[in-house]
Image (spheres, rainbow, N blue to C red):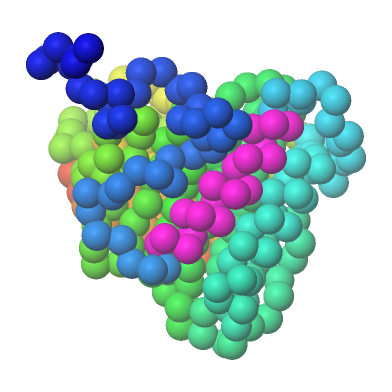
């Protein structure tokens, strides 16, 4: 009996509802099967595949977070086997197609390459969230060429949000419900209506009294301040217009490399907290839309 005219034949693809496996025995990990609506270079494709491969183990380990073996790197700064495993996966996947490139990672240090190209990776940004079962963490991967960040990816495995950007080509987001939507920073110019992200220094890190003075000023002039504990996602939120600004102190290159490109390609601005050009690994960083940069510099001063 032929199917009704308004119902597709069974041998044709139909819209999927929910997140069940597409085929028996095939588990979906990230959205590699989605076709991008924005042009992607070979480099971005290689980066996305590497990030999705690393995300598989993170998602498995997050589901068994209480069983993870954890060692301390320092007061309040933890590293898990999930961190190390994810970075090894990133290194291996990227080396298969770009063996001559260097690699700078949070856990495994730096591998020298051809002197021009270097991957900069944080395999698990938001480790403390991860270890406490808080589903807000990301993989951050950037490509630096001749001292300039030219490509960046921030992937949140739990929400399945993929933020990506290439220098001169814009910034985009892929989600389970939208493919390659262009990212734009917010247009707010009134600080009293702005939502600002930040990173609060924890035990053994930063100048707490100095930071609290800045935070007090920001709290008194904005609609709200958020601290979610994953800097790469904070930058992505600025790029997506979810935050209007973000500031933090003492971030490493792998914390910011991909995120700063997302913000710039989404029409935002990145500097230090005094409004001067940001240098990778510098002591302070400020990401804003164009309308709030000067006023945020004034507030943080």
The percent position of residue 144, horizontal first and vertical second, equals 48, 72
Magenta span main SS: helix
Closest to the observer, 28 or 130: 28
Question: From this viewpoint, is residue 43 visible?
Answer: yes
Residue drawn at (47%, 54%) of the image: 48
The percent position of residue 208, horizontal first and vertical second, equals 65, 36
Q: As drawn, is 151 to the left or to the right of 172?
A: right
Q: Write down the quadrant of residue 57 in the picture.
A: top right
Closest to the observer, 20 or 298: 20
Part of the protein shown in magenta: 44-61
In the current view of this chain or complex, which residue is farthest to the front?
1
Placement of the N terminus among the 4 image quadrants: top left
Q: Give the tally of numbered discs.
A: 0
In the current view of this chain or complex, which residue is farthest to the left?
5
From this view, report whether residue 232 is shown above or below residue 98: above
Residue drawn at (50%, 31%) of the image: 23
Q: Write down the quadrant of residue 109 in the picture.
A: bottom right
Residue drawn at (42%, 36%) of the image: 161
Closest to the observer, 134 or 215: 134
Q: Write down the quadrant of residue 200 in the picture.
A: top right
The percent position of residue 80, horizontal first and vertical second, equals 80, 40
Residue drawn at (46%, 30%) of the image: 22
Closest to the observer, 32 or 249: 32
The percent position of residue 41, horizontal first and vertical second, equals 33, 67
Q: As drawn, is 251 to the left or to the right of 46?
A: right
Question: From this viewpoint, is residue 270 visible?
Answer: no
Q: As drawn, is 50 to the left or to the right of 130?
A: left
Residue 113 lies in the magenta stretch: no
């Amino acid at each position: 009996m032929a199917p009704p005219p308004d119902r597709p034949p069974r041998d044709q693809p139909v819209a999927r509802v929910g997140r069940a496996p597409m085929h028996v025995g095939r588990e979906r990990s990230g959205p590699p099967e989605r076709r991008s609506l924005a042009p992607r270079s070979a480099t971005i494709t290689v980066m996305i595949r590497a990030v999705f491969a690393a995300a598989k183990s993170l998602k498995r380990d997050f589901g068994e977070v209480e069983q993870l073996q954890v060692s301390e790197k320092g007061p309040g700064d933890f590293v898990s086997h999930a961190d190390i495993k994810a970075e090894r996966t990133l290194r291996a996947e990227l080396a298969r197609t770009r063996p001559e490139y260097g690699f700078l990672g949070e856990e495994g240090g730096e591998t020298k390459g051809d002197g021009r190209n270097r991957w900069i990776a944080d395999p698990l940004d938001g480790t403390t969230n991860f270890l406490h079962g808080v589903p807000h963490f990301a993989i951050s991967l950037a490509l630096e060429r001749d001292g300039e960040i030219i490509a960046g990816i921030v992937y949140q495995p739990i929400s399945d949000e993929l933020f990506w950007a290439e220098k001169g080509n814009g910034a985009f987001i892929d989600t389970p419900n939208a493919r390659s939507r262009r990212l734009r920073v917010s247009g707010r110019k009134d600080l009293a209506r702005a939502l600002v992200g930040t990173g609060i220094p924890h035990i053994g890190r930063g100048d707490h009294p100095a930071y609290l003075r800045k935070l007090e000023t920001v709290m008194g002039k904005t609609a709200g301040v958020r601290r979610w504990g994953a800097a790469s996602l904070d930058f992505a939120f600025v790029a997506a217009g979810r935050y209007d600004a973000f500031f933090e102190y003492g971030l490493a290159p792998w914390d910011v490399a991909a995120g700063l490109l997302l913000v710039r390609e989404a029409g935002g601005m990145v500097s230090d907290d005094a409004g001067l050009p940001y240098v990778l690994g510098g002591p302070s960083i400020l990401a804003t839309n164009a309308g709030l940069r000067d006023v945020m510099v004034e507030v943080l001063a």
